[in-house]
Image (cartoon, rainbow, N blue to C red):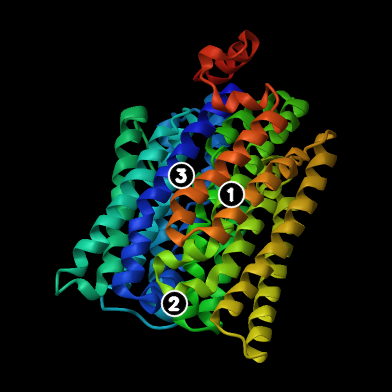
Amino acid sequence: MATLAKGGRTNTLGFILRLLGGIPFLFVGFRLYGVDEMGRFAAAFVVIEIFALICSLGEKRGLAQRLTEGAEDHEDTPTNLVFDGMLTSLVFSIAACALLIAFPVIIFPSGTNSEFDMWMIAAIPAFALTEILLAAQAYRYDIATTVRARAVVEPWTKSILVAAFFFIPTLASGGIALAFLAAIYAALITAAWSFLKTYGLPKGWRPRPRYLMKMTARALPLVGADVIERGTRLLDVFLLGQFTSAGTVGIYWFAKEVVSLPQKLKTSFEPILSPVITKNLKIGNMEAIAAQVRQVGFWIIALQVGIALMLAIPGEAVMGLAGPAIVGGTGALAILLAAEVIASMAVVSESVLVYIARKRNLAISVGVITLQGALTVAFILLAQHLGYNEGFQAAGAAGALFVALAVSSLVKALVLKTLLKAPVSNWRWALVYAAAPAVVVGFVFTEFTPEWVELAIGGPAILFVYMWVIWKRGFTEADKVLFRKNANLPEEILEAAESTAKPR
């Protein structure tokens, strides 16, 4: 549990840094380039991310299991096993790039901003390889590299360059695309540097087609789970791109980016949770896994609710940061924040189901994303039929996501509870006790203060009141492990953490 807490603290800090680094990109992008231009970029970005997830072959979670098994059952070194995954990923990435070059309408349904936009396709192999390298580092409990690559190097490279390119006449029209591409490759270089220091170069490695095909076949359920889990956050943007204007996509995507912090909190523990789960599975300790799911699940939802309140209550002021044209997406922002809170149980449950019930988990995920797709199209078309504006169409897509994630959380938690034969719920009534005074504080700021006060003072005040109450009423001694250094932990927790963290 101490290992999970340490990894979660590091990764959560990383996502806060990532949010801070990404704010300038959003501000500059929407203010200098425009809503339509950012909408076209968003439509292309979601397609690139989906293809990159497919090409990473589920190694974000699957690599931990391959390395755990390979430590005893395989003659290859860990470095060689990682290179097997990288080679296969690279082959799939080349095929994906060729497909998008042949059919650009898939990635640019509303057209392009400039001739540089097609170069965004080259981000797919870099994105996929970075995922594998960071998974390898996470197996050695190195979460700091993920923070450096994804939370510092990538967002700040993107934010700095998008502003710089705008003032270079020959590159201004493609500034968004070029800044994005440079940021993805900067993250790849950062991850590769740490990987080489940790694992070194492969020795005696050579491509083995038969083994790579077997590895790919085994990875398919993981690929499906990863793509569908992430796809539920991208499908709405993709469908809005197909059925609405670039402006609508831009409004909705800004709201999605604001929501990215509570969304990413769900995966803050995933890099460190995967190796801990695989080691407990190896010895059949199902009760320990259930306890870890309950504990991590509550940590996540407790933090998510606080951040959701801080962003949703002064929602109009938050959306107004990108300009008056974006304020119409405030309703979508509130629904998206609620959706991410309710989704926390599904994500934590899936982190175990992908190992003990891969096919069943995949079947549930397919059903959920099918439901989401159908509801998204239905809600968008209904809003258009009733003559509602872009803000309502965006809210319709957010509502479809909320329903789909609620169904996913309920079903996956029930399945996991049955398989582990132990409770896994992360719900506690203390969440309500903490939210109530925070809502009152938020109401005072939104009703009686100007917008800049809402953002600068009101938002932090809402979060402070919520966290103070949840700390007093909701957190047990076990929960408070997340906020402590190892030196302050009880001796038995330290001993368990040390035995878990010993490298193989």
Of circles 2 and 3, the one toward us is 2
Q: Which residue is mark 1?
A: 219
Residue type (three-letter) at the residue carrying disc 2: Ala
Rendered view: 190 above or below 285: below
Q: Which residue is mark 3?
A: 15
Q: Secondary structure at mark 3?
A: helix
Q: Do the residues bearing badges 3 and 1 touch, measured as CB atoms within 8 Å?
A: no
Residue type (three-letter) at the residue carrying disc 1: Ala
Say which of 500 and 204 sits in front: 500
| Residue 222 in sight from this viewpoint | yes
Q: Which residue is mark 2?
A: 325
Q: Earlier in the sequence, mark 2 or mark 3?
A: 3
Looking at the image, residue 172 sits to the left or right of residue 273; the answer is left
Q: Please state the horizontal and vertical placement of residue 335, each as a whole percent of the image.
A: 64, 63
Residue type (three-letter) at the residue carrying disc 3: Phe
As measured in the structure, the alpha-carbon distance from the residue carrying label 3 to the one carrying label 1 is: 27 Å
Residue ID at (35%, 63%) = 27
Rendered view: 416 above or below 405: above
Rendered view: 401 above or below 87: below
Q: Please state the horizontal and vertical placement of residue 1, each as a whole percent of the image.
A: 62, 24
* Outermost front residue: 448
Within-10-Å neighbours for mark 2: few <14, some 14–19, many 20+: some
As measured in the structure, the alpha-carbon distance from the residue carrying label 2 to the one carrying label 3 is: 27 Å
Q: Please state the horizontal and vertical placement of residue 132, each as a whole percent of the image.
A: 44, 44
Q: Secondary structure at mark 2?
A: helix
Q: Earlier in the sequence, mark 3 or mark 1?
A: 3
Looking at the image, residue 114 sits to the left or right of residue 322; the answer is left
Within-10-Å neighbours for mark 3: few <14, some 14–19, many 20+: many
